[in-house]
Image (cartoon, rainbow, N blue to C red):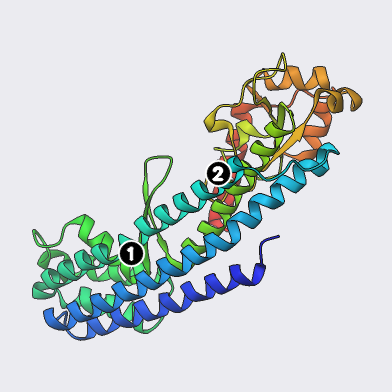
Amino acid sequence: MPDASVDRALIEFYRRAERRIKRNLQQMALSGWRTAYCEARLQEIGTIIAALDAKTRLWSTKQLPLEYKDARKNVAYAMGKALVPFNPIDEGMISVLVTATNSDVGMALRSVVPQLERVYIDARQAMITAEQVKDQVARGIIEGLTPRQTSRALERALRTGATRQLSGVLDLDARARLVETAQGRYISIMCKDGVTRRYQLRPYAEMVQKSTRSMTAAEGTLQTATALDVDLIRISVHVGACPMCIPYQGMVYSLMGETPGFPIMGPDDRTPYHPWCGHSMNPVTVEMLEANGELEEMRAFVNDPQRVVTNGLEYAEVRAGRSEGTPLEEALDAQAEAEKLRRAA
């Protein structure tokens, strides 16, 4: 089992790094963005980022193999079978997962200094005609304002005299970079929906832990199921699934196409479906479905893409043949409305 204390230590390391970077940015802002001083601060930030990269590599090397091995044990236990010996395929898969994690994190972290360099250039340009912008960036860092407060302060500065002064000097992208930097959003990630989002360091570390452990557990599950000649995989169900996950809830896929009536699992059908995804994959057999009296009900459900389930109780009704589930569009509309209410709260 992965060591929870190692997870906590990594998050704490990112938290301290976040504070050190903010102090360096504070000093840059208070220096009036002087070139020599800012270059020295950026070098220091680069050293901090390199330490984060090294620490994350140590974490992935220790924790991901344990996550993979846990998944293997869970599959064997669920199937009531002896655990197959660890083999070169498992070793290779773990190596690929660790390498991919280190590569992705390294790329994301290496984007921090170039982004801050652009902010420094933006701030230098803005400072010539808009001292208010520099002051608001510095104030947001010094006073520890919330992201919303800092954003509003910058917006006020840009709506007043600074707006006229910045005409043709600071474009919308540059303004956005200043706001994001004041909020501590240094990590740029291209998401599945094609939108680039920027994360603060500590939430990014938490996201890395969640997503990489989920991917590792998924691979361990699939590799072990295949080794045990288990052809069917069931996707978990939970309340509040996002629009990306709703169509997959409760689905049963065939790994090798050996079970009639069940769709073959494609690359996009595997969990996790996004970085914060809470879904998992669990092995199941035709015999288990027959014993539960749900074989035909599941065949009908998985072959109707316009029907989904939104919670465990509804899924139980589908499995028992007492419900066909919820129309997909209706479920997506309900989720969108719930998200609006959550954001408004």
The amino acid beneath tag 2 is: Met
Q: Residue at 16% across / 79% down in the picture?
A: 33
Q: Residue furthest top?
A: 260
The picture places residue 84, in percent across and down from the top left corner, at 74, 41
The amino acid beneath tag 1 is: Glu
Vertical comparison of 129 with 242: above or below:
below
Q: Mark 2 points at which residue?
A: 93
Vertical comparison of 7 with 103: above or below:
below
Q: Residue at 20% across / 69% down in the picture?
A: 160
Q: Residues within 10 Å of mark 2 (few under 14, many from 20)?
A: some
The picture places residue 119, in percent across and down from the top left corner, at 22, 67
Q: Residue at 59% across / 42% down in the picture?
A: 88
Vertical comparison of 215 with 112: above or below:
above
What number is the disc on residue 260? none
Q: What element carries label 2?
A: helix
Q: Classify residue 301 as left or right of residue 216.
A: right
* Residue 5 in view, yes or no: yes
The picture places residue 282, in percent across and down from the top left corner, at 73, 38
* Residue 277 in view, yes or no: no
Q: Classify residue 223 as left or right of residue 114.
A: right
Marks 2 and 1, Cα distance to the nearest angstrom? 37 Å
Q: Classify residue 311 as left or right of residue 104.
A: right
What number is the disc on residue 180? 1
Q: Residue at 10% across / 62% down in the picture?
A: 169
Q: Nearer the viewer, residue 175 or 196?
A: 196
